[in-house]
Amino acid sequence: MSEAKGGRGAQLKHTGLRPGWTTGACATASATAAYTALLTGAFPDPVTVTLPKGQTPAFALAVEELTADGRAMAGVVKDAGDDPDVTHGALVRATVRALPPGSGVVFRAGPGVGTVTRPGLPLEVGEPAINPVPRQMMRDHIAEVTRTHGRSGGSGDGDVEITVSVDHGEEIARSTWNPRLGILGGLSILGTTGVVVPYSCSAWIDSIRRGVDVARAAGRRHVAACTGSTSEKTVIAEYGLPEDALLDMGDFAGAVLKYLRRHPVERLTVCGGFAKLSKLAAGHLDLHSARSQVDKGFLAGLALRGGAGPALAREIADANTGLAALQLCAAAGVPLGDLVAVAARDEALSVLRGAPVAVDVICIDRAGTVVGRSTPGG
């Protein structure tokens, strides 16, 4: 992408969708503007920053303040482009003040930014939830502003405290994974590239990975990957798992399995709706309806192996939905739910490629009733 005025991105090739900027990029822009004002008395508006892959977006300032006590504050409104991001439109502020020489760059969590309270994340307990890449971006830009505007040989140039805050961030964070991950009090300042790619769901996938990290750090030997709140309730009732052992998998079965392949736990339970898990059984790792469909022909083949006759198999293949296929089999005494659970378990094990993880699968219907399950394998 070329430079984008006001923090707005060009359209992505082939998709027509407009990318946006991460909270980390917004915090970097705010901190850069604030520190420039601290040294020069004037806020650059728009303020241009350089992202890790070389893009140079320019962000319009939404707020700015230079105080008599030696602090400068600037803020930009996050533009997530065409991605359905819960932080789209949030005001990300950075307040900068000088520190004694040798202090370096120190980060603080202001209102709306969370604090890490559990081990397993890429930050120490007690640290503000400002991830490593955004921290490095801010350090790099502080250094660049120092080179451009700092006093020649000025003692203490570049030694600053940066307090990042997000208006209404604590309220927004309630709809994220942060409370479950032990990030309390607000949002995380995220981003590895600075760019939000629409519908890449990178934040969700990153949260799955952090969920595994937190569970491992807590010594959990059994975790559950669930497609939604109903399946979470099912595994809690089945196994009494604590909150930090529950992974909000959603549609991203592949993200869970591939991360556990590199960072294994002793046991994984996959729990979800029958139709979604029939997609995993058929080899799909993204279970979203826009990217994979229930294969009734595959279900018919499973039913045949489970004792169904040719006539029932034809009915299953012609069924309108996965649930209708399940009901046909239930009436005929064919355990299609169990057959799907076993096939989904075996597919999960194939993705794990021999990692020391035992896997079992539970299929439920929309009411949360268990309609199929496998024994642990692996």
Image (tube, rainbow, N blue to C red):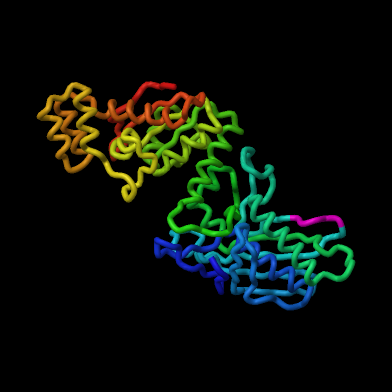
Residue visible at 46% across and 51% down in the picture: 201
Compare residues 290 and 174 and report the one nearer the observer.
290
The residue located at (51%, 60%) in the rendering is 87
- Residue nearest the viewer, comparing 176 with 196: 196
Task: Tell me: 109 left or right of 347.
Answer: right
In the image, taking residue 100 as reference, residue 166 lies left or right, namely: left
Q: Is residue 105 magenta?
A: yes
Please give left or right for residue 342 compared with residue 62 in the image. left
- The image shows residue 141, relative to residue 65, as above or below, that is above
Q: Residue at x 81, y 64 (%)?
A: 98
Magenta residues span 102-106
Q: In which quarter of the view is residue 141 placed? A: bottom right
Counting from the top left corner in percent of width and height, residue 179 is at 54, 46
Image coordinates of residue 266 in percent, x first then y, are: 52, 25
- 215 or 131: which is nearer to us? 131
When the figure is inspected, residue 95 is found, relative to residue 223, above or below; the finding is: below
Viewer-proximal residue, 23 or 245? 23
Q: Position of residue 348 (x, y in %)?
A: 41, 31
Magenta segment includes 30:
no
- The percent coordinates of residue 99 (x first, y second) are 82, 61
Location of the C terminus by quadrant is top left
Residue ID at (55%, 68%): 2
Q: Is residue 107 above or below residue 145?
A: above
Q: Is residue 288 visible?
A: yes
